[in-house]
Image: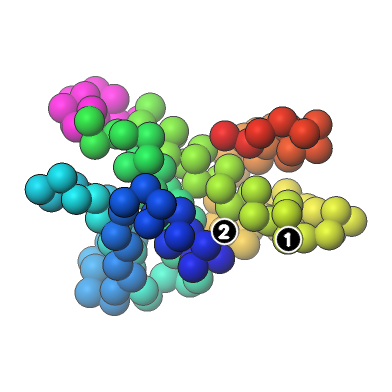
Amino acid sequence: MIERLKGLAKKHGIVVFITPMLDNEGYADVKDGRKYVFINANLSIPKQEYILCHELGHLILKHDEFSTIYHNFGKRHLEHEADTFAISQLLMNYLEETPEEYWNYNNFMEHHQIENRFEFVVKEDIKDFCLGKEIT
């Protein structure tokens, strides 16, 4: 899964570093026009996947263009968008790789340590997937 996510990052011109040298879970950064994501290697693999998707969400959704808004009053909204992006990416992979009879949103959320407040997002994405809609 990490390699698939690195491929998504590369497709968007984002360089990913997974390193034990971080004192937080991870972050996205833009320097001289280049986009980077740094992920803490000391996290569990499922948590690394979630944080990587979250940080990719910030860059792919162009949140770096709203840095003033982010720091002044839009942090909650942009963080929610990045979380929703992360859940959608991880869930799409889960639904494609897991036989339908084993789908379980609780197991998915626990595996990736997704907060309960996102239960509705997960359920809606599963419904959309089942109806043949694109998960965004």
Image coordinates for residue 48, horizontal then vertical, percent: 44, 64
Q: Residue at x 24, y 68 (%)?
A: 22
Kind of residue sitting beneath label 1: Glu
Q: Residue at x 64, y 55 (%)?
A: 93
User: Which residue in the rendered view is the most extreme toward the left?
Assistant: 32
Would residue 7 be found to the left or right of residue 35 on screen? right
Residue tagged 2: 112
- Quadrant of image for the N terminus: bottom right
- Can residue 66 be seen? yes
- Can residue 27 be seen? no
Image coordinates for residue 23, horizontal then vertical, percent: 23, 66
Secondary structure beneath label 1:
helix
Q: Quadrant of residue 78?
A: top left
Kind of residue sitting beneath label 2: His
Q: Quadrant of residue 118?
A: top right
Q: Is residue 43 above or below residue 62?
A: below
Q: Is residue 33 above or below residue 102?
A: above
Would residue 35 be found to the left or right of residue 9 on screen? left
Residue tagged 1: 97
User: Which residue in the rendered view is the most extreme toward the right?
Assistant: 101
Q: Residues within 10 Å of mark 1 (few under 14, many from 20)?
A: few
Q: Is residue 69 magenta?
A: yes
Q: Residues within 10 Å of mark 2 (few under 14, many from 20)?
A: some
Q: Residue at x 58, y 52 (%)?
A: 90
> Which is more foreground, mark 2 or mark 1?
1
Near-viewer residue (64 or 106): 64
Tell me the magenta residue range. Answer: 66-76
- Quadrant of image for the C terminus: top right
Would residue 99 be found to the left or right of residue 79 on screen? right
Q: In terms of sequence position, does the residue under pointer 2 or pointer 1 come before the other?
A: 1
